[in-house]
Each structure stands twice: as structure tokens, then as C-alpha cells.
């Protein structure tokens, strides 16, 4: 997916695009996962506010992304 590539790019503009994609229900889960890959701990606050439905892909993506980002804070 394109969003996954953006998550690995580490470009400031890519980060903005990923944040914008959170408002699109069809892209939300992939944007959440990509933000976890991106590695910007500023996304923690944004991701914690995102409403996701338990049992859907975006729920697991949110948990994984937050786990990754919190691990960066510990390092």
C-alpha cells in the first residue's frame, strides 16, 4: 500500500498526508499503521484520540502503532 511506503519515508510531507488520511474511513486503518512505522512520537497523542471499533483492522493497527511509538519513548 502507498500509505505503508509513506510510513517508511520519514518525510515531513508524508507525515502530514498520513494525518490527513485519518479522516477517511477507507484509509484510516492503513494510515494508523503507517504512522506507527513512521516513528514520530508526536503521533501518540493523535492516535490516542482516534475512535476505532473493536474487532476491526484499525483497532489492531492502533494498538500496534501505539506500542511501537511508546517503545521509541523508552529508548
Image (cartoon, rainbow, N blue to C red):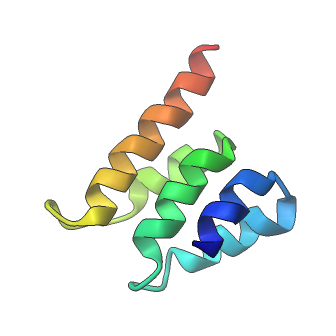
Q: Residue at x 55, y 47 (%)?
A: 36
Quarter of the image with the C terminus in it: top right
Q: Nearer the viewer, residue 20 or 8?
A: 8
Q: Residue at x 49, y 56 (%)?
A: 33
List x then y, in percent, for residue 26.
41, 85
Q: Residue at x 71, y 74 (%)?
A: 17
Q: Left or right? Give the position of 57 relative to 33.
A: left
Image vertical order of residue 60 relative to residue 3, above or below: above
> Which residue of the protein is positioned furthest toward the left in this rendering?
55
How many tags in the picture?
Answer: 0
Q: Nearer the viewer, residue 54 or 30?
A: 30
> Which residue of the protein is positioned furthest toward the top in this rendering?
75
List x then y, in percent, for residue 15.
73, 62
List x then y, in percent, for residue 42.
65, 45
Image vertical order of residue 14 relative to residue 74, above or below: below
List x then y, in percent, for residue 29.
41, 68
Image vertical order of residue 13 relative to residue 75, above or below: below
Q: Left or right? Give the position of 15 relative to 47.
A: right
> Which residue of the protein is positioned furthest toward the front in this rendering?
1
Name which quarter of the figure residue 59 lies in: bottom left
Quarter of the image with the N terminus in it: bottom right
Image vertical order of residue 35 relative to residue 63, above or below: below
Q: Is residue 19 visible?
A: no
Q: Is residue 12 visible?
A: yes
Name which quarter of the figure residue 20 lies in: bottom right
Amino acid at each position: 500500500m502507498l500509505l505503508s511506503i509513506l510510513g517508511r519515508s520519514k518525510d515531513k510531507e508524508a507525515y502530514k498526508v498520513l494525518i490527513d488520511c485519518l479522516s477517511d474511513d477507507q484509509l484510516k486503518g492503513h494510515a494508523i499503521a503507517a504512522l506507527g512505522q513512521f516513528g514520530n512520537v508526536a503521533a501518540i497523542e493523535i492516535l490516542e484520540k482516534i475512535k476505532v471499533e473493536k474487532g476491526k483492522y484499525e483497532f489492531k493497527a492502533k494498538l500496534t502503532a501505539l506500542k511501537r511509538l511508546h517503545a521509541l519513548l523508552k529508548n
